[in-house]
């Protein structure tokens, strides 16, 4: 019996490409090619340009893009988007965001007041501002952060989400057919039977997702929307205020998985701004890893299949 014919390789050994690592695209080189375990495709050993060889990794084909001007532009856009998101996250913390973050800001404020340039140390006189800045920066980077392993197909959905909105001038339909509150409620209904009622693990589950809802409500208008979506947001808020049950409605009842996943990939920056200890961050990460895995398995249910194209009148409003 003749061996089955493998599909052609979309990428070749030693080819320079772009490769996704989390939500970012990096220039890379293909070191090796091997068939997948199923034999119906290929996997690629990637070396990221400028990174140590310890970061070399075998990746599936859907994480790789051709090194061409269009994809280079996409990589630059993603980098700019992440930089902008980081800056907005920092500003949000300073202005007071979710209660947990606001509490962390209070702690940070006390640290700053206690370590200002006029503070003396060991009788040596005023500390130089630069010394304080370096010390403060080191303290910031030493804080625990949360890195969630987002499923590859959800990363691809987020890239398409960015392209649909920023390039194609389309919108996620709202109210969403499966809003954030429904997604979280469905997950809790799935996960609660695995926790002993009244146990610490059950309490952690409830606290985690109460916090996630609050983070989403606070973050959506400030850091999760693209510019093209802001008119839609304001129109939606006006509509919600006119309805009889406006007080019971939040953005968690209107926006869905697309915006929720934008929050999930932003949590590393947001959590780094808090005063959570390593144990708390570890527990938070464990809970959210389970959630993102579950959401990935149910992506076809919760993400919209098509985006909507707004009217020309809407497009004109976004220009002001």
Image (cartoon, rainbow, N blue to C red):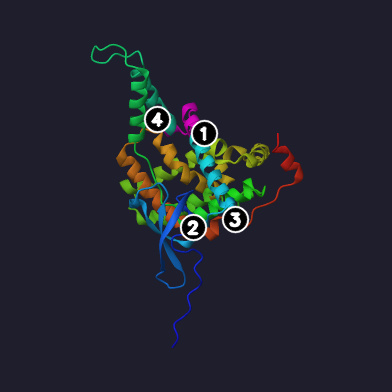
Disc assigned to residue 104:
4
Residue 88 bears which disc, if any? 1
Q: Magenta stretch: residue 208 in it? A: no
The answer to which of marks 1 and 4 sits earlier in the sequence is 1
Q: Residues within 10 Å of mark 2 (few under 14, many from 20)?
A: many
The CA span between labels 2 and 1 is: 29 Å
| Residue contact at pointers 2 and 1, CB within 8 angstroms | no
Q: For the point 57% across and 37% down, which residue is it?
A: 221
Front label number (2 vs 4): 2
Q: Is residue 90 magenta?
A: yes
Q: Is 152 rendered above or below residue 223?
A: below
* Element carrying mark 4: helix
Quarter location, residue 301: bottom right
Q: Which mark is residue 64?
A: 2
Within-10-Å neighbours for mark 1: few <14, some 14–19, many 20+: some
Residue 198 in view in this figure:
no
In the displayed orientation, state which residue is furthest to the right: 313
Q: Is residue 138 visible?
A: yes
The main secondary structure of the magenta stretch is helix
* Nearest to the observer: residue 228 or residue 281: 228
Range of magenta residues: 88-100
Q: Position of residue 189 (x, y in %)?
A: 44, 55
Q: CA distance from mark 2 to mark 3?
A: 24 Å
Seen at 74% across and 39% down, the residue is 316
Spatial separation of the CA atoms under disc 2 and disc 4: 38 Å
**Secondary structure at numbered mark 1:** helix
Instruction: State how far apart marks 1 and 3 are (Cα).
Output: 27 Å
Q: Position of residue 1 (x, y in %)?
A: 44, 88
């Amino acid at each position: 019996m003749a061996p089955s014919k493998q599909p052609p390789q979309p990428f070749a050994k030693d080819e320079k490409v772009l490769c996704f690592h989390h939500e970012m695209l990096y220039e890379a080189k293909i070191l090796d090619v091997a068939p997948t375990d199923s034999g119906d495709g290929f996997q690629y050993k990637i070396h990221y340009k400028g990174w140590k060889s310890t970061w070399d990794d075998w990746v599936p084909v859907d994480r790789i893009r051709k090194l061409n001007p269009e994809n280079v532009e996409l990589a630059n856009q993603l980098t700019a988007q992440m930089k902008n998101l980081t800056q907005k996250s920092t500003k949000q913390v300073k202005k007071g965001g979710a209660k947990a973050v606001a509490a962390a800001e209070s702690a940070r404020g006390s640290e700053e007041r206690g370590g200002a340039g006029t503070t003396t140390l060991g009788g040596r006189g005023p500390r130089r501002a630069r010394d304080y800045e370096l010390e403060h920066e080191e303290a910031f980077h030493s804080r625990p952060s949360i890195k969630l392993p987002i499923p590859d197909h959800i990363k691809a959905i987020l890239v398409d989400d960015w392209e649909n909105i920023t390039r194609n001038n389309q919108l996620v339909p709202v109210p969403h057919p499966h809003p954030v509150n429904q997604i979280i409620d469905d997950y809790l209904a799935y996960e609660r039977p695995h926790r002993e009622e009244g146990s610490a693990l059950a309490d952690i589950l409830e606290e985690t997702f109460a916090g996630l809802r609050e983070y989403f409500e606070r973050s959506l208008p400030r850091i999760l929307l693209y510019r093209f979506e802001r008119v839609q947001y304001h129109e939606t808020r006006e509509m919600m205020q006119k309805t009889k049950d406006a007080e019971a409605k939040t953005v968690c009842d209107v926006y869905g998985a697309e915006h929720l996943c934008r929050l999930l990939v932003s949590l590393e920056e947001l959590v780094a701004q808090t005063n959570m200890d390593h144990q708390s961050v570890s527990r938070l990460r464990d809970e959210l890893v389970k959630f993102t895995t579950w959401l990935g398995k149910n992506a076809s249910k919760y993400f919209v299949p098509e985006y909507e194209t707004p009217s020309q009148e809407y497009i004109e409003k976004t220009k002001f």
